[in-house]
Image: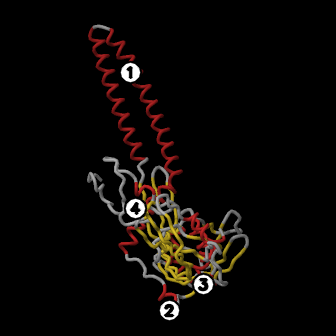
């Protein structure tokens, strides 16, 4: 909880409070009147973070509405920024990049050759999102997507983690300088950002929610089985009585048949209503909110790869990031671009995820989804 304590201390300090750290995992806060009104605190308040807290502390955690309350204090400040990443010491690129690139790029139907390498600057776009999934229970998630605006590559989780570690050091931050700004590529427009972000958002949320959805389905099946067993027992008992009434004769037997038939119909209606209630209770609603954006002007070592397939050629830039000491994944013209494998198409040498060159489900002809995103060019089926 040290990071949460530091965050709260920074927010309170920015709003004029006097803040002192106390052990274990606490803060003593002398709050001015506007801050007291906003948070409902006394002039002096002791806050506690983590399992072990100072005596008399107000517990602060990720549960409840504390993040929303501190977020309301911040408003839109800090939602978007541009900074330059400066390395304290120069980092040399790998002496033999061939092995490294072979791990990062797999081309089963094309070949590549290293054409050149040079130091360069790039703009990294880091976007943080928060999602809330609500069903019979609630789940929150927070994650960051990253893109290289120069190469078009998606920054994978491992590379993002290493970059965030470098960015956590205050000494690594400076205001973007003119030489770096001139060399770095332009930021993507809003339409491009939305098109690149949307499929990755869906993939990341689905991946993150798999355990939550699996647990929800188990609870739903358990409740369905319980409801079915209960109503099935009632229905079986009513059917036994109905069969007995049908074997009888006279007005009494006829009344019994009518009564048990009505009972069975009522049980079936109640069963249908209970299933509808379960569907409503377990209906899943997911909301996604953009939290923060950060543009990082960063130094890279750029490799130029010459991609060849048949008589076509294409130059592909791919960046090695000194701050993370890691090579990014190659550009993907179709697909999420999170893996190393790429297929090269015949017509325009698009590089796609493996599914981008799959056969059409209708006519069986393989075609490039980057060339023909809407439908198969042969049978015109979507």
Circle number at residue 238: 1
For the residue labelled by badge 4, is the local secondary structure a helix, a strand or a loop? Answer: loop
Q: Residue at 46% of width from left, 76% of height from top?
A: 149
Tell me the distance, in whole angstroms, between the alpha carbons under discs 2 and 3.
Answer: 14 Å
C-alpha span from label 4 to label 2: 39 Å
Q: Position of residue 264 (x, y in %)?
A: 34, 25
Q: Badge 2, how many Cα within 10 Å: few under 14, some, many 20+?
A: few
**Residue 348 place in picture, x, y as percent:** 37, 66
Residue 332 or residue 177, whichever sits in front: 332
Residue 170 falls left or right of residue 229: right
Q: Earlier in the sequence, mark 1 or mark 2?
A: 2
Discs 4, 2 touching: Cβ within 8 Å: no
Viewer-nearest of labels 3 and 4? 4
- First in sequence: mark 1 or mark 4? 1
Q: Residue at x 36, y 12 (%)?
A: 244
- For mark 1, give the secondary structure: helix
Q: Residues within 10 Å of mark 1 (few under 14, many from 20)?
A: many
**Residue that carries the numbered disc 3 in the rendered image:** 86
Image coordinates for residue 353, horizontal then vertical, percent: 45, 59
The outermost residue toward the bottom is: 178
Image-based side of 238 in relation to 111, left or right = left
The answer to whether the residue labelled 1 contacts the one labelled 2, judged by CB atoms less than 8 Å apart, is no
Q: Which mark is residue 345?
A: 4
Residue that label 2 marks: 178
Image-quadrant location for residue 85: bottom right
Q: Earlier in the sequence, mark 1 or mark 3?
A: 3
Give the foreground label among 1 and 4: 4
Q: Nearer the viewer, mark 1 or mark 2?
A: 2
């Amino acid at each position: 909880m040290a990071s949460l304590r530091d965050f709260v201390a920074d927010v309170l300090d920015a709003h004029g409070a006097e803040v002192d750290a106390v052990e274990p995992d606490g803060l003593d806060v002398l709050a001015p009147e506007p801050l007291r009104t906003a948070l409902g605190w006394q002039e002096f308040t002791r806050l506690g973070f983590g399992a072990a807290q100072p005596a008399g502390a107000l517990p602060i955690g990720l549960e409840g509405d504390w993040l929303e309350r501190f977020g309301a204090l911040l408003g839109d400040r800090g939602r978007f920024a541009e900074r330059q990443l400066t390395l304290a010491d120069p980092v040399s690129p790998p002496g033999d990049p061939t092995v490294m690139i072979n791990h990062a790029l797999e081309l089963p139907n094309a070949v590549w050759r290293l054409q050149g390498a040079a130091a360069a600057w790039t703009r990294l776009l880091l976007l943080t999102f928060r999602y809330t999934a609500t069903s019979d229970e609630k789940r929150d998630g927070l994650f960051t997507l990253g893109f290289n605006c120069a190469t078009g590559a998606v920054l994978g989780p491992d590379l993002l983690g290493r970059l965030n570690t470098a960015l956590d050091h205050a000494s690594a931050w400076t205001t973007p300088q003119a030489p770096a700004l001139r060399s770095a590529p332009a930021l993507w427009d809003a339409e491009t950002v939305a098109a690149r972000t949307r499929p990755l958002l869906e993939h990341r949320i689905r991946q993150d929610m798999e355990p939550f959805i699996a647990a929800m389905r188990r609870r739903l099946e358990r409740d369905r089985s319980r409801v079915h067993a209960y109503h099935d027992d009632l229905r079986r008992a009513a059917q036994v009585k109905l069969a007995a009434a049908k074997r009888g004769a006279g007005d009494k037997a006829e009344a019994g048949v009518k009564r048990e038939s009505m009972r069975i119909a009522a049980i079936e209606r109640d069963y249908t209503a209970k299933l509808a209630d379960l569907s409503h209770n377990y209906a899943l609603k997911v909301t996604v909110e953009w939290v923060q954006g950060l543009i990082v002007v960063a130094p890279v070592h750029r490799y130029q790869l010459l991609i060849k397939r048949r008589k076509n050629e294409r130059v592909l830039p791919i960046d090695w990031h000194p701050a993370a000491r890691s090579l990014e994944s190659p550009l993907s013209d179709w697909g999420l671009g999170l893996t190393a494998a790429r297929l090269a198409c015949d017509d325009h040498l698009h590089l796609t995820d493996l599914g981008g060159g799959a056969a059409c489900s209708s006519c069986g002809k393989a075609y490039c989804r980057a060339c023909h995103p809407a439908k198969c060019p042969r049978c015109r089926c979507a």
